[in-house]
Amino acid sequence: MLDRTAPDTMPAWGRLLAHVVVWALGLAFLVPFIVVVLNSLRTAQEIAQTSMIGWPESWAFPNYAEAWSQFCVAQNCTGLQPFMWNSAAVTIPATIVSTLLGAVAGYAISLWRFRGDTWIFGLVVLGIFLPQQVRLIPWTFVLRDIGLINTLAGLVLIHTIQGLSFTTLFCRNYYLSIPQDLMKAARIDGAGFFRTFFRIVLPLSPPILIVTVIWQFTHIWNEFLYGVTFTTGSQQPVTAALIGLNAAIADVPQYGVQSAAVVLAALPTLLVYLFGGKYFLRGLTAGAVK
Amino acid sequence: MRRAPELLVIWGPLLLAAAHIVVFTAWTVWISFTASTLMPVSEFVGLRNYSSVLATRNWKIAFDNLIVFGGGFVAFTMFTGLLLAILIDQRIRGENVLRSIFLYPMAVSFVVTGVVWSWLLNPGMGVQKLVNDLGWAGFRFDWITDREMAIWTIVLAGVWQAAGFAMALLLAGLRSVEPDLIKAAQIDGAGPLRMYTRVILPTLWPIMVAVLVILLQMAITTFDLVRALTGGGPGIATQLPALVVYDFMFQRGQIGRGAAAAVLMFLTLLGVLLPHALFKYARRRRAADA
């Protein structure tokens, strides 16, 4: 993405105008982020006297400590901490397992080939388009029957199985570019399914594995509907807890602490984006082109 | 040749993923034809759930809102995305920073952004309060508490969140335009405006269709953002189909009707996805024939 198409005939004033407009828009896009970060460093009184938008007069860093470990959500004064750990306990295993299974499945479909691989791949990819709402009732009864309702393990199961649609698609498309000759050579050497995978395919995989991991991590961390439907109270992931937090605002306005909580909840995926933006974008476009 | 562990690793996860898609869809469709309320029952009631869902005020408002929100969201996201892509393509200084800024909302949960927007848009403490405090006492920006305008707050937050995504795909499209095409147009004396309207944009339309379809898919399944931003209110003024599904299933304990609403939602989605699939298929056929 280094080349540009912009015609060279663009006059100098035109380029200047483009700079002004695009940077102004860039700042505008940052406003919600800046506002919430600044708010997270203001005291409740300060915000109450002015508005949500303002420069901190005294930097209220304790807001973060309070949001992390003391803040009350629905009479539960544990702060955001347990919910953050819940989200991590769901997101990390589900990301790793779905990525690994997707890599093996993608490898089997693209390079090893087996009877029926095309139709099963087609079905799995259809999962990308199937709205969550259609799966809600079945998941409710499946989770209840296997005893995983209101558990983090239940959410891990859901995100692992559903994530396979994306991870299989990503890996399969990537592995298609591995030359078949390489596979033939491995087969002639007598390497079996797993040996070929670990010796040849996996060492070629880091680029797509990074894309897949970032995609899965971001999506599972940010997921809300399943979290709010299948878990309650202390088992909730942070997105579901945040809604409770926002509802509690009406009772005791503590916007400083609440802003800090919002920043904390967004931080993991923001950090991933900051360091892996390129791969995040690749996942978005890979998911889009399908 | 094939050994058990291979078969298990290849087929296990794939079959599970494929089966959950097929079985869960069939399951929800089946429930939508039964008299199920809190628990599934097998009493067949034909299309009764569908007719009663379609007759509720909730669903009518949700569907009208979907048309307004979907139309506004898609149109403004596309416009903003295209504007940003064209501007960024003008050899802008700091392009990478800008691209990251426009795309960062996509990395953050809709719950987080919804909460932040609900604060900014709250007339008592957000933008309106700020402007009022600055001295313009008559300034009003209270869409979020206005039944007529509240749906546009969701459009606003949605556009802010998704415009960077549209920009990224369209920018990639802009940069894959044939340089020869641009040179030829330059020789013909086309100015910047004509260059875009007559030469560059017409080659972009397949990407624009792809972006359009993804945005429509996002609009139809929107849930988190509304839950965090307005909660469907004021009253039920910002109700959307996904919220109605949830309401039937988990708040009113009418899973038959909830399933019917979910199927209706899915059919709406298919109304977008199927034409696009046919369109892509036809294009591929034509490309293969040529």
Image (spheres, rainbow, N blue to C red):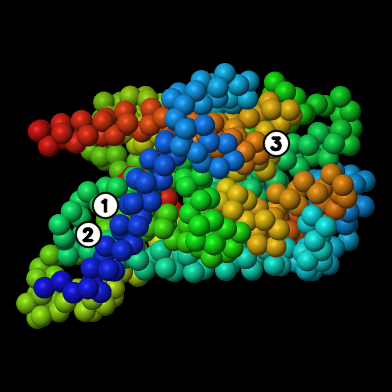
Label 2 sits on what residue type? Ile
Q: Residue at x 51, y 20 (%)?
A: B51
Q: Residues within 10 Å of mark 3 (few under 14, many from 20)?
A: many
User: Same chain for marks 3 and 2?
Assistant: no
Give the mark toward the camera: 1 or 3. Answer: 1
Q: List x then y, in percent, for residue B198.
A: 33, 24
Residue plotted at (63% across, 20% down) = B57
Mark 2 and mark 1 in contact (Cβ < 8 Å)? yes
Residue A252 vs residue A35: left or right? right
- The image's mark for residue B230 is 3
Q: Which mark is residue A109?
A: 2
**Residue occupied by mark 1:** A121
Secondary structure under the numbered disc 3 in the rendered image: loop
Q: Does residue B271 appear left or right of residue B83 in this picture?
A: left
Looking at the image, residue A254 lies above or below residue B286: below
Q: Are marks 1 and 3 in contact (CB under 8 Å)?
A: no
Q: Please state, as top left, top right, bottom left or bottom right, where the C terminus of chain B lies in the image.
A: top left
Amino acid carrying mark 1 in the image: Phe
Q: Chain of mark 3?
A: B
Q: Secondary structure at mark 2?
A: helix
Q: CA distance from mark 1 to mark 3?
A: 39 Å
**Residue B243 spot, x, y in % from top left:** 60, 35
- For label 1, the SS is helix
The residue depicted at 70 percent of the width and 53 percent of the height is A242
Q: Are marks 1 and 2 on the same chain?
A: yes
Bin the neighbour count of mark 2 within 10 Å (Cα to Cα): few under 14, some 14-19, many 20 and up: many
Label 1 chain ID = A
- Camera sees residue A34: no
Indicate the quadrant where residue B54 lies: top right
Residues indicated by labels 1 and 3 sit on the same polypeptide chain: no
Tell me the quadrant of the picture where the N terminus of chain B can be found.
bottom left
> Earlier along the polypeptide chain: callout 1 or callout 2?
2
